[in-house]
Amino acid sequence: MDLLATDGHWLAFAFAFLMGLSILMYVILDGYDLGVGILLRGATDAEKDQMIASIGPFWDANETWLVLGVGILLVAFPIAHGTILTALYLPTALMLIALILRGVSFDFRAKVLAAHKHWWDKSFFMGSLGAALAQGYMLGLYIMGFEHSLSSHLFGVLTGVCVAAGYSFIGAGWLMMKTSGDLQKKAIRWARSSLWLTAAGIVLVSLATPLVNERIFDKWFSIPNIFLLAPIPVVTGVLVLLIDFMLRRLPMPNDRFAWAPFAGAVSIFVLCFHGLAYSFYPYIVPEKITIYGAAAAPESLMIIFVGAMIVLPCIIGYTIFAYRVFWGKVQDLRYY
Amino acid sequence: MDALILARAQFGANITFHILFPTITIAMAWLLLFFKLRYNKTQDLKWMEAYRFYVKVFALCFALGVVSGITMSFQFGTNWPGFMETVGNIAGPLLAYEVMTAFFLEATFLGIMLFGFNRVSNRVHTLATVLVAGGTTLSAFWIIVLNSWMHTPAGFEMRDGVAHATSWLEIIFNPSMPYRFVHMLLASGLTASFLIAGLSAYQWLRGDKRVGVTAAMKTGVYAAAMLIPLQILAGDMHGLNTLEHQPQKVAAMEGIWETQRGAPMLVFAVPNKETRSNDYEIGIPKLASLILTHDLNGEIKGLNEFEDHPPVAPVFYAFRIMIATGLLMLIVSWLGSFQLFRHGVLSRWLAFVVVGMTFAGWVATVAGWYTTEIGRQPYLVYGVLTTAEAAATNVSAGMIGTTLILYLIVYITLIIAFIATIFYLARKAGEQPDNLNRAPVANRPGVAGSRQILEGNV
């Protein structure tokens, strides 16, 4: 099998697209609830209850996008799945333990003795932060092509911090929509500080990726690509400035534009994801295995593809339904 | 220790921890639906009381199941890269269908089931409960299909060392799937029944005489009494199916080294792999032959007939633990049903026994899984792929060992926290003033009277 072949079955591309979509959905959806978890650190006890109530009905389904993403990697690109996950063995294990802590803290904190609650709040925060850092670190190592050098580990740590900042930012955006009063004002402050850290992270990754990878450099900085692709960083930059402009003016009367920072965060995530996906295509393991070389047998992929085309619209449909059910400001401490 | 043993220990620890919670939630979702439907029909507050308490236990179990399940989806790749590389064309679509048809369904509607009580109509809430219950059962179906295929692979051909599907019907309905699926669903039913019976007996012994406690206790004990004979029957049929397809596993379960006619059923023995025989054997003559071949002098193949066979002692002991727990379940649930039916209450000593058996389902389920999974060794996919072939080659033993210790610390802490928390919740439920009769807050028709079900953080 030629691992570097770029001409392959259209199914390989379709599954790469679906996997990208799942990861993007995950980063946005679990991104905001992990972000809310990170922001717990600076909240009072009453605010903590509200913040967690705002994500309570959603986190479980949000996390399922991660299972779908890694599931597609597992089933559609089995060779790449083994290579990537064994290369990222330690951060993966740390992320899983962090996600375990975060997920169970949701329930334990609401059920244990009042005197023990703060332990579960702490593990909620640690779990959220740990998962974000581990995911960012994995992104960093991925960009560095899983190279085990001091510089690539340092870069991983840096991307870890930036992803945590990005999650905090989108989490703050979520809180602005779901809360009001003091907590909303706090969320605006959180958003402003995390926005600039996020922006710094984006610049960092955008500079590092073409510098460590000649192929990606050529892809972005050749004519005419440089003109065709220029809108991606330009629009991202404009969005950052626009969000900052909005944040200085929020909250507005009647809660106008409370949704804007969240929408802005989603747009930035989509743009960044698009940029990364464009850079690495057609590789799934940077510079080693392409999506076409790693793809499973077309017959098996076809079975899944047909199912996905039927089921995914249903999933999106009832996800929208669930969000509509819990639309609006989060209600007090009881989450019914 | 070498990397293979550590990788197995790590994956084994994860699936052992994981199965504890789905085995509760699969059946408890249906029992919650039962409580809710009873309440919808009778408007009797005791059913709402029972729902209200067990939905909290359910939510906790669900969260623990989800997070440990996510860990599992990653450990397929980190621990067994060779598994997907060899049989990915079969396992992939099955796992994909599990995620797509079941995981999203249960996760999304769980939010509405737990927190949406006051935001949707009672009918939609009931529907959400049905979808959560259906989703958990569906996910059990897909994962059991895959697991059964690993035991009795069918509907595929090997091309260049990679499995390719030839018939999806044969893959899904592989020879052991129906038995394993039924056996697992009944195991879940028994686990949830004993958990409910145990917790409500605990509440009752502490003097919590609310009607909901008795209603839940009756539901748990009666359900267990009805399910256990079905489980014994299903287990027997599953055993015969295993004898047909994996005779060496049955030989290990029965501790039979030499092929023999009229084999005894060993009540106790210490299998000795050095001498390839048993020490301290106590057996009932001819019973194993009778059970397995339905003939007193039926022939059972011994372990020495097979080139590869599983390690005997763990399979032999695990099988006995499962059987003993099952028999205890039969005695306790039938005696309990008799007392409840005759007197409306359990005698004190039996209530203590029922509390002691709160987690009997866990013991039997885990022992059963160890029997069947260790019984498949040295294979990962029976006759196709060995466990050693599937293991990661580029992950050091030190790394696996370190993460194994971390995982174990987390799992043990969480199991302790889980058990402590559900008993704490059971005590708290009795101490809180009964707020079911408080004036309804919501005005929505059909919701008003029952909205307090979710009062207090779920």
Image: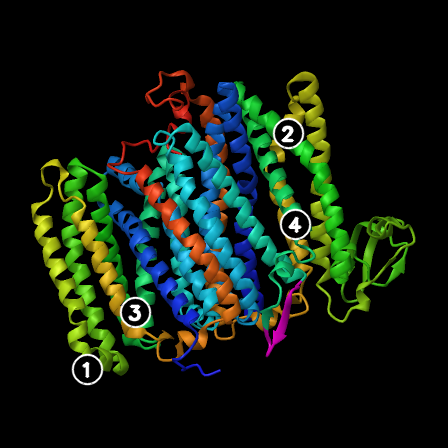
Of A177 and B342, the residue lying toward us: A177
Tags 4 and 1 on a common chain: no
B167 vs B58: above or below: below
Colour scheme shown: rainbow
Q: CA distance from mark 3 to mark 4?
A: 46 Å
The subunit letter for the residue under badge 2 reads B
The residue that disc 3 covers is: A277
Q: Are marks 2 and 3 in contact (CB under 8 Å)?
A: no
- Mark 3 vs mark 4: in front: 3
The subunit letter for the residue under badge 3 reads A
Tags 3 and 4 on a common chain: no
Q: Are marks 4 and 1 in contact (CB under 8 Å)?
A: no
The residue that disc 1 covers is: A222
Residue plotted at (76% across, 65% down): B273
Residue plotted at (40% across, 29% down): B454
Kindly identify the amino acid type of the residue bearing the numbered disc 3.
Answer: Ala
Q: Are marks 3 and 4 in contact (CB under 8 Å)?
A: no
Q: Secondary structure at mark 1?
A: loop
| Residue A228: image location, x then y, percent | 18, 73
| Residue B167: image location, x then y, percent | 62, 64
Q: Secondary structure at mark 4?
A: helix
- Mark 2 vs mark 3: in front: 3
Q: Secondary structure at mark 2?
A: helix
Numbered circle sitting on residue B221: 2
Kindly identify the amino acid type of the residue bearing the numbered disc 1.
Answer: Ser
Q: CA distance from mark 2 to mark 3?
A: 56 Å
Tags 2 and 3 on a common chain: no
Kindly identify the amino acid type of the residue bearing the numbered disc 2.
Answer: Val
Tags 1 and 2 on a common chain: no
The subunit letter for the residue under badge 1 reads A
Of B210 and B224, the residue lying toward us: B224
Q: CA distance from mark 1 to mark 3?
A: 18 Å
